Image: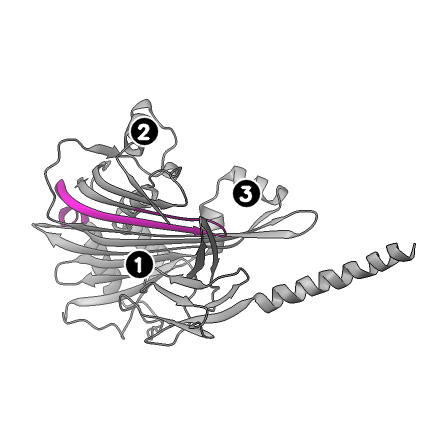
């Protein structure tokens, strides 16, 4: 009996020691922009141990907590140069170098001048004339990177892309000539999902009179450009201010030369989940605590028309699943980028690039055949 009591008394002490050890093993810090010293949200923080990947993501204030063992930490964000730091070199604040100039959050004007909707509607009026007004082939470079709590995946692809006319029902075609998968083993397949998203859900595909009517536009007076005809207009959804972004407009040629669009958790839950998911998620104890998307695109003139020159897409999701014992938290972050240039190589056969799954109600046999052909493109495998 005394032995049993001693064992029972030892268990809480052991649990306390384990908890203290876990707390002591945690590494905390803040990730900031090297130029502005502003915190950077949604940065991927991860380490590699053999075939395993352990990851975390910084929160809205740029703060991160690592509670897994590591010798080296990798810090990755689509708008910043990727870095790696050993445990000895890690400090309380990690600075990342931006790869491009980010927009200012300060907007002075409080009302929308009358010239703004006028110029925006001119852009829409001439959209079919100025954007993808003819079918054109480009060389493309696409890469996509996915990090979860305990997994890592990267995919790179180069080849030719046939860009259709923007009007009507556009259909892209691809010749994926050089493909590399990075994963823990050779079981992973190709992933063109976000390439489809960046092409078929490009900002200019839904930039129309309705979009102008549903958003408020304000000029950013801090925007700087070597051209006197370029202006940056910040926009916000009139019903949801967190659905926001900006456009850079060439007021002389009446075209958008750059765009950015961001959506937050509330907007995505409301607009990007199915009715089934909305009903079943609470019953299964699933709660989305973070769900953001960010897209950024630059357009360039090729011949007599504007085409996508470069596009990036970032998706970050964090969810909690409740169960009887404890709440489990999971996160996924995806970063993708595609660039097009006007130097395609000779191609003999191209595969139809079907629209993203969430944009199609029904997959025909032909669509399924195209997807099967795309999944069979030659690939080489590397360790993540």
What residue occupies the far right of the structure in this picture?
1
Tell me which residue sits at (44%, 74%) in the image. Answer: 93
- The answer to whether one can see residue 223 in this image is yes
Residue 310 forms part of the magenta stretch? no
Q: Position of residue 131 (x, y in %)?
A: 17, 48
In the image, residue 215 above or below residue 358: below
> Residue 260: which numbered mark, if any?
1
Query: Which of 260 and 354 lies nearest the eye of the viewer?
Result: 354
Task: Give the quadrant of residue 194.
Answer: top left
Label 3 and label 2: CA atoms lie apart by: 31 Å
Q: Which structural element holds mark 1?
A: strand
Mark before the other along the chain sequence, 2 or 1: 1
Q: Position of residue 268 (x, y in %)?
A: 45, 50
**According to the image, label 3 marks what residue?**
278
Label 1 and label 3: CA atoms lie apart by: 28 Å
Residue 94 relative to residue 164: left or right: right
Q: Which structural element holds mark 2?
A: helix
Tell me which residue sits at (36%, 51%) in the image. Answer: 145
Residue 8 relative to residue 148: left or right: right
Mark before the other along the chain sequence, 1 or 3: 1
In the image, residue 69 above or below residue 90: above
- The answer to whether one can see residue 200 in this image is no
Q: Which structural element holds mark 3?
A: helix
What residue occupies the far top of the structure in this picture?
365
Label 2 and label 1: CA atoms lie apart by: 33 Å
Mark before the other along the chain sequence, 3 or 2: 3
> Residue 372: which numbered mark, if any?
2
What residue occupies the far left of the structure in this picture?
303
Magenta extent? 126-155
| Nearest to viewer (mark 2 / mark 1) | 2
In the image, residue 360 above or below residue 42: above
* Disc 2: CA contacts within 10 A as few (<14), some (14-19) or many (>=20): few
């Amino acid at each position: 009996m005394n032995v049993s009591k001693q064992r029972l008394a030892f268990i809480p002490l052991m649990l306390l020691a384990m908890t203290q050890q876990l707390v002591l093993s945690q590494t905390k810090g803040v990730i900031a922009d090297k130029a502005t010293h502003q915190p950077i949200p949604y940065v991927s923080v991860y380490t590699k141990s053999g075939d395993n990947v352990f990851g975390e993501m910084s929160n809205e204030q740029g703060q991160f907590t690592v509670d897994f063992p590591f010798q080296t930490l990798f810090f990755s964000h689509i708008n910043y140069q990727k870095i790696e730091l050993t445990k000895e070199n890690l400090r309380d604040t990690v600075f990342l170098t931006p790869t491009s100039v980010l927009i200012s959050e300060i907007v002075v004007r409080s009302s929308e001048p009358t010239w703004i909707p006028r110029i925006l509607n001119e852009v829409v009026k001439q959209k079919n004339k100025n954007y993808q007004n003819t079918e054109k082939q480009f060389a493309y470079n696409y890469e996509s990177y996915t990090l979860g709590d305990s997994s890592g995946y990267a995919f790179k692809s180069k080849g030719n892309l046939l860009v259709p006319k923007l009007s009507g029902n556009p259909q892209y075609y691809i010749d994926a000539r050089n493909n590399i998968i990075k994963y823990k083993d050779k079981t992973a397949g190709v992933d063109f999902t976000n390439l489809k998203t960046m092409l078929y859900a490009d900002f200019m595909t839904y930039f129309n009179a309705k979009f102008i009517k549903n958003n408020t536009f304000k000029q950013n007076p801090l925007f700087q450009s070597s051209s006197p005809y370029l202006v940056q207009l910040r926009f916000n959804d009139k019903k949801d201010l967190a659905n926001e972004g900006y456009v850079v407009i060439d007021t002389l040629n009446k075209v958008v030369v750059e765009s950015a669009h961001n959506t937050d958790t509330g907007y995505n839950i409301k607009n990007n989940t199915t009715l089934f998911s909305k009903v079943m998620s609470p019953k299964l104890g699933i709660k989305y605590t973070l769900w953001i998307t960010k897209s950024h695109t630059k357009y360039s003139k090729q011949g007599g028309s504007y085409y996508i020159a470069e596009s990036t897409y970032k998706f970050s999701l964090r969810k909690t699943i409740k169960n009887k014992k404890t709440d489990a938290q999971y996160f996924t972050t995806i970063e993708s980028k595609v660039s097009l240039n006007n130097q395609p190589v000779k191609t003999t056969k191209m595969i139809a690039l079907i629209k993203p799954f969430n944009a199609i109600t029904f997959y025909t046999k032909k669509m399924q055949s195209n997807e099967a052909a795309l999944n069979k493109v030659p690939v080489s495998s590397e360790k993540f």
